Amino acid sequence: MPDLSIDCAGIKSPNPFWLASAPPANSGLQVQRAFDAGWGGAVWKTLGVPIQNVSSRFGGVTIRGVQGAGFNNIELITDRSLETNFREIYETKKKYPKNAVVVSLMVETREEWKDIIKRSVDAGADGLELNFGCPHGMCERGMGSAVGQEPRVNQEITSWAVEFSTVPVLVKLTPNVADIVPHGLAARRGGAHGVSLINTIKSIIGVDIDRFVPEPRVAGLSTNGGYCGAAVKPIALHMVAQLARSKDFGIPISGIGGVSNWRDAVEFILLGSTSVQVCTEVMLRGYRVVEDMIEGLGDYMTTHGFKSVAEMVGKAVPSYSEWGDLDLNYETVAKIDPSKCIGCHLCVTACHDGAHQCIHPQGSEPAVKLKLPVPNGGSHARVPLVDESECVGCNLCKIVCPVPDCISMVSVENGFQPSTWNEHVTEGAKLRPKKGAH
Amino acid sequence: MSSSLSQDRSETVFADYKGEYTPDQAMVEANRCLFCTDAPCVKACPTHIEIPQFIRKIATGNVKGSARTIFDANILGMSCARVCPVEVLCVGDCVYNEMGVPPIQIGKLQRYATDHAFDAQWRFFEAGPDSGKSVALIGAGPASLAAAHELRRNGHRCTIFEKRPAVGGLNTTGVAPYKMKADRSVEEVQWVLGIGGIEVKTGVDVGASISFEELEKQYDAVFVGVGLGPDTILSVPGTDLPGVEGAVDWIEKMKLGRVPTEGAKSCVIVGGGNTALDCVREALGLGIAQVTMVYRGVEEKMSGYAHEWKAAQTQGARVEWQALPVAYEGNGKVERVVCQRLDTNKKPIAGSDFTVPADLVLVAIGQSKLGHLLSKLEGIEVSGGKVVTNDDGATGRRGWYAGGDCRNGGKEVVNAAAEGKAAARAIHAFLTGGV
C-alpha cells in the first residue's frame, strides 16, 4: 500500500480525505466517528457568533431518478456555543492526535478574529480555514463571500489571521467570481499558507411548482443557497486548475466540490489539490464512503507507480492548456464495438439531433446511399453505422451509450502535421479540411 | 346492454400473478428505461405504443400524459397491460436483454399508468363531429371495441351487436383470472364506451335475429369481429361423460359463474397451446391437486408460450408429452383418461396405453372458426375458416371489414385491438371518400 499521508500547507494528515466544513463536521462525536471510519482530517463547521437557522435548509436535484446529483443549502455557520465547540475540538484532537483538525472561522472585526483564532489554536487546531466563501445569509451580514469577492478585504483579513495564528492558515475561496485567480493571489498576498476551494455556488435549487415558492421552502418564502454535490465538480476542477497553473500562485490547494469517490479525488489531486474535502456525498451516504476512497486511491497509486500523494499533485496541470494551443489536425472518429452494442440507437439520435448526423441505422437511406460497411460480428441488425468521413469525433455518442466501452474515439492518421490555431494564425500552419461543416 | 356480473364467480379466488407497482416501484423501473430510438419494444407491439415515451412520462411524474400516449395507440391499453404475453412481445425485445440485464417491465408500467387513468376517471378522447355515417360492428370483443372507439373519434355512429349477454369478448370470458378478471374487462368496456355514440345491442345474433343483408342496408359499413366459435371436440369414447368439457367453455363458466371443483382431485388438460396452459394454471389455482397436461407433441413443439409453461411447472403442473387420449372412462362421470403414446411422427405406439386419473377433463385443442358465417355473402372470401382481408381489414365485399380472431385465426387481444383500429381507419377513409 503506498503512503497516502499528506502535508497540505503544513497541515499533516494520514490521508488526503478531509470532511469539509459543513454539517458532517458539526460536532465532536461526528468528527470522531468520521475519524474512526477512516477520514484523514476534518474542517470543523464554521465557528463564529452562533446563529439561528431556518427550517428547512437543504434542497436536492434529481436527474433521471438519481437523487442529490446536485445539492444546495441555506444553512449558516455553527449554531452551537463557541465554548461547546472548542471543548469538543480539544477532546477530539486529544483522542485523535494523528488526524487533522482544521477549524473554519468567520467573524467580522479584527478583535473578533484575534480572539477566535487564539481560542482555536488553544483548543488544538492543526490549521485554520477562513470562510470567505459562504454565498448565502452570512454575506448579507458582510461576511463569507462578501469578503471573498473583494480581493482587498480578503487580503487584509487574511493578513490579520496570519498575524494572530501560530498554525497554518487556509483561505476558503468563493466560486461566485468571474475569475478565481485574483482572489487566490489576494489570499497569497495576505500570507495564507494555502487555499481551499470551491465553496458553494449561488443557486436556486428548484421551485415548488404548486405553491409557487422556490426551494427549500421556509414558510411562504425561500432564498438563494449554496450549490454543491457531484454536479459542481467540473466547476471546481476548473477553478482548482486555474490557480494550480497560475505562475504567481504557488501555494497548496485543498480541493473541494463534488468529490464523491476516489476517482473524483484523483482528478482533484492531478489538477493540483493536496487534500480533498468532502461534504455532500457524506451527507447523502455517510462517513463510510471513505473506505472506497482510501482503497481506490491506494490501488490507483500502485497501478501508476506513485509512492506518495505528493508525487501526484498537479500531474495533469501541464496538459491543461489554452484552446489556441490544441492540435486542430488531430482527428478522431467514433468506433462502435458490434459485439458490445445492444442496439438502443441512443447514439443515432444523439448524433442526428445533437451532433453532426453521421451515425446511421443499418438499412437507412444514408447508410444505403453511402454504402456504409456492415460490421462483422454484430449480434444483430441494430448495430449503427458510423460515417467516418463525416464523424467529427465529438464524443457525444460515447457519452450517451449505456454500454461501457462499446463506443470509443479512435484517432485516425490524416497525413497532416500537428497544427494549432495559434500556429495557424502566426505561421500559417496548414489545417486539415473541416468535417461535418456542410 | 347487460354489464352486471355475478358476484359469485369461481375466478374471484385468484390473485394477480404479476402484482401492481407502487408509485415508488414504478418510478425506479421507469428510470431504468434507456429511451431507445426506433425502439425494438415499439416494433414488437402490434399497436406500436410509443413505449419509451410513456415510460419517460411516468418517470417525470406525468402519468396522465403517459396514459394518453398508451391509449392513443391502443384504447385497450389497460387490459393489454395485463394480458399481453409481453415476454414474447415488447419485453422480449427490450435491448437490456442484449446486455444480460433484466428487461424493463413494460407491461407492469403500462398497467401502472392505465390503472391510474381508470382510477382517476381520466378521459382523453372526444367523439368527432357527427359524420352522418353509421357503422355496424358484429361482436363486442376487443376488435370491435377498438374499431368503434376509433370510428367515434372520427364522428361515425356505431352499433355493436353481441349475441351473448356479456360484453368484452374473450377479455371478459376467456382471460386467465390471475391476469384479469371479468369485472375489470367490463369496466374497460364501459370506459371505452364513455366516448359516447356507441350503442351496444346484446343478445342479438346477427345472421339469425337480423340478416347480414339487412344490416348492410341499415349501415354504411360493417365490421366483423366475431372471434372464434366453440371448442373443438376430440371424438373419443366417453366424450359425453359429465366432467369432460371444452376448455374455452369451461373457462367462461369459471369467469362468469361457478365451476364445480369441490372434491376434484385430479384434472387432465388435453392440448399444448396457450388455452391449455391457462387451464393447467387455473385448475391448479382452483385447488385441484393433480393436474396433468396431455400433449401429442414434444415440449419444444408446443404452441403454448415457454414462459407460461414455466409458470405452470412452478405451480406443480404435470405433463405427458407425446400422448393422446383414446378414451374417457368413468361411472356416471369421468374418472380417468386412457392415453396412448405417440412416436415422433405423432403415430400411436401399439401397446403403450396408460391411464391418468381425472375428475375433470378440459379439452383445449382449438376452437372452430366462424368465417363460414359470412361465406354466403358474395365477395367475402373465407380461407381455412378465416375471413380474408387486405392489410387494412377490408374484405372483398364493398363496405365490409373484419379483424380479430375471426380474421387472424386466434391471436392476442393486442392483435385484435390493432386490427380493429386499422380497420376503423380504413372504414373512415371509405366513408369519407378516401377510397
Image (cartoon, grey):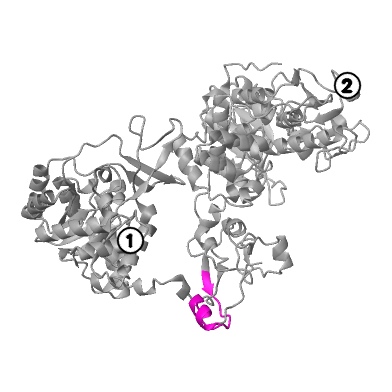
Instruction: Pinpoint residue A85: horizontal percent, then vertical percent.
Output: 12, 45
Tell me where residue A153 sits by quadrant: bottom left
Camera-nearest residue between A175 and B57:
A175
Find out whether the residues at labels 1 and 2 contact each other: C-beta distance under 8 Å.
Answer: no
Q: Chain of mark 2?
A: B
Q: Chain of mark 1?
A: A
Pick the front one: B343 or A105:
A105
> What's the magenta region?
A409-429
Please, is residue A412 above or below residue A235 in the view? below
Residue A435 relative to residue B142: left or right: left
* Callout in the foreground (1, 2): 1
Tell whether A349 sits left or right of B47. left
Q: Which numbered disc covers residue B218?
A: 2
Give residue B181's quadrant in the image. Answer: top right
Disc 2 element = helix
Residue B154 drawn at (x, y percent): 77, 30
Circle on res. A25: none
Q: Is residue A319 magenta?
A: no
Residue in the picture at 16% in, 42% down: A49
Estimate how packed mark 1 is, as few (under 14), some (14 to 19) or many (20 or more) residues with alpha carbons within 10 Å.
many
Q: Amino acid at mark 1?
A: Ile
Q: Are marks 1 and 2 on the same chain?
A: no
Residue on which disc 1 sits: A180
The amino acid pointed to by label 2 is: Gln
Q: Quadrant of the C terminus of chain B?
A: top right
